[in-house]
Amino acid sequence: KIDAYIVSKFITTFFIALLLIIGIVIIFDISEKIDNFVAKEAPLKAIVFDYYLNFIPYFMNMFSPLFVFITVIFFTSKMAADSEIVAILSCGISFHRLMVPYMFSATLIAILSLCLNLFIIPDANKTRLEFEEQYFKNSKTKSVGRNVHYQIAPGEFVYAESFSAWNNTAYRFTLEKIENNTLVSKLSAETAVYNDKKGCWTLKKYFIREYNEDLTDKIRSGRQIDTVLALSVNDFYLNEKTVETLTYEELNTMIATQRMRGDGNVKYALIEKNTRFALPFSAFILTIMGVALSSKKRRGGIGWNIGLGIGLAFTYILFLKFSQMFVYTDTLPPAVALWLPNMVFAVIAGFLYKIAPK
């Protein structure tokens, strides 16, 4: 009965807090973006179903540590203030046994967060970001890739001095093939235009030079030639937003491809992959901290506990975002940097849990 009582309070309070905060955030978001909706003539159906319906799981998952911590602090402090915790412990139930329903509830929330990360949010982000691109941002301001170096296949390297989104054209394009550390051919073109219908690149004013073992060269040139490359237009615009729209399998494929290419943008994919697992795990750590901090009855009510809980929850989220800087600056590997907040807060939670029964 006690387990069911605590689990019901945990889950009910969590979702009530979630709905209240999401409602407030949506109201403020509408007031901020209403001018864009009107100016771009966004349909009401698209606003509701394409944007906000897909915004909710993204926001809910991003701030789930905050909701978990506040939930635990709030209802546990209320139980302590009503002497329910004292009554439970006085019946011979140990503090460790008291944690069982808390950890069970944290497991349910962690599984929910993990499922959102792996199966629901990527597709939701794809629709949401397409809506934002169409109604919030000016497509003319899309950035242009410059000095792009890729290994598109083992031994095949491409270089483009610049790329224009206006006409899907790469300028000063070069394709080099290397075998056994030896350059065997080099293709240079003034421009490389991607043809959507044919699914290939059209090289204009090209020049091909093939190197033979006897040190002789074979040279070909022409005005135009079509070729198929393991390269697409989207490869010039992969960023931190792109990885948010990929499933777990697609994310792993992108990481393998970018590592093979030597693409520096692989850090975005690695950050996203580790965050998808590190964030759900925080439910366990913050639940332990919340119980340890709020299970004792305090003078003055639950105000101090709630304030402390909100402060620590925001500190965790800030720490999680700040830890990404260690990846951008190559200070720490992504697997270490993104799990560092969990490691630090796990130590704090362990200390608080140790002294809580006393």
Image (cartoon, rainbow, N blue to C red):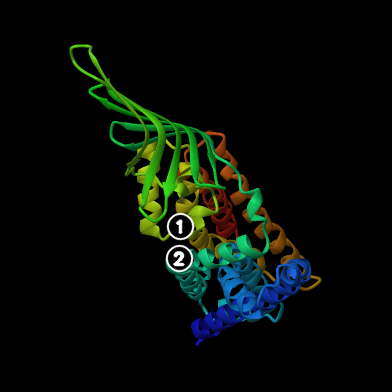
Q: Is residue 250 above or below residue 35?
A: above
According to the picture, the residue beneath numbered tag 2 turns out to be 114
Q: Residues within 10 Å of mark 1 (few under 14, many from 20)?
A: some
Q: Residues within 10 Å of mark 2 (few under 14, many from 20)?
A: many
Q: Residue at x 51, y 36 (%)?
A: 332
Q: Is residue 150 above or below residue 165?
A: above
Q: Nearer the viewer, residue 314 or 179?
A: 179
Residue 102, how many percent across, how many down?
A: 52, 72
Is the C terminus in the top left, top right, bottom left or bottom right quadrant? bottom right
Are the residues flagged by discs 2 and 1 in contact, CB closer than 8 Å? Answer: yes
Q: Earlier in the sequence, mark 2 or mark 1?
A: 2
Q: Which picture quadrant has residue 218?
A: top left
Q: Residue at x 63, y 72 (%)?
A: 71
Amino acid type, callout 1:
Phe
According to the picture, the residue beneath numbered tag 1 turns out to be 277
Q: Is residue 356 left or right of residue 305?
A: left
The residues bearing labels 2 and 1 have C-alpha atoms spaced at a distance of 7 Å
Q: Is residue 267 left or right of residue 78?
A: left
Q: Is residue 176 above or below residue 258?
A: above
